[in-house]
Image (tube, rainbow, N blue to C red):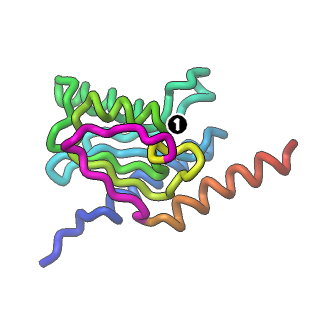
């Protein structure tokens, strides 16, 4: 029997986080960190709430996962995030030594690949998981923001 725990399952959990950010008026990006098929951290963007440009979903998730594990390294963990990480978050992921990053929507203008930001040599990357759902939520947010201005 196939395990219910796959990339789509965990990306849906990250999308739940993104929807919480959306409801708060934050850019709707969500993240979860998984270890041994168990979610050990959940987070979403809090840059507006905390008035902190570094409060991206990934950064919040890295901190929560490190607290859960009792150490700064996230080896044998996977980050699921609804948007391709920016260069700041990719840089932070380098220092966590996370095994795997799985993202939903691509970000050709601000994503880490555009800036050629290096990940840890052992980190595997995979994009496009539930890409349409992830993109639609972000696009909806920005369309609504622009119509208010």
Label 1 element class = loop
The residue sitting at 41% across, 31% down in the picture is 59
Residue on which disc 1 sits: 45
Measuring from the top left, give residue 51's x and y in whole percent.
61, 21
In this view of the protein, which residue sits in the foreground, 52 or 91? Answer: 91
In this view of the protein, which residue sits in the foreground, 35 or 104? Answer: 104
Measuring from the top left, give residue 87's x and y in whole percent.
46, 35
**Picture quadrant of residue 53:** top right
> Please, which residue is most extreme toward the right here?
149
Residue 97 as seen in the image, left or right of residue 107: left
Residue 121 located within the stretch drawn in magenta: yes
**Residue 17, placed above or below residue 117:** below
Measuring from the top left, give residue 112's x and y in whole percent.
46, 42
Residue 69 as seen in the image, left or right of residue 115: left
The quarter in which the N terminus is drawn is bottom left
The residue sitting at 24% across, 45% down in the picture is 123
């Amino acid at each position: 029997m196939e395990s219910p725990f796959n990339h789509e399952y965990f990306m849906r959990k990250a999308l739940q986080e993104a929807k919480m950010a959306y409801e708060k008026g934050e850019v709707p990006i969500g993240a979860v960190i998984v270890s041994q098929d168990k979610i050990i951290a959940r987070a979403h963007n809090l840059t507006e709430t905390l008035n902190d440009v570094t409060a991206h979903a990934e950064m919040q998730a890295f901190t929560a996962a490190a607290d859960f594990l009792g150490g700064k390294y996230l080896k044998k963990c996977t980050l699921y995030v609804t948007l391709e990480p920016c260069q700041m978050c990719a840089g932070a992921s380098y220092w966590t030594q996370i095994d795997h990053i799985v993202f939903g929507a691509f970000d050709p203008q601000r994503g880490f690949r555009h800036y050629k930001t290096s990940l840890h040599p052992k980190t595997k990357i995979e994009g496009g998981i539930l890409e349409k759902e992830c993109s639609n939520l972000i696009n909806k947010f920005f369309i609504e923001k622009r119509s208010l201005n």
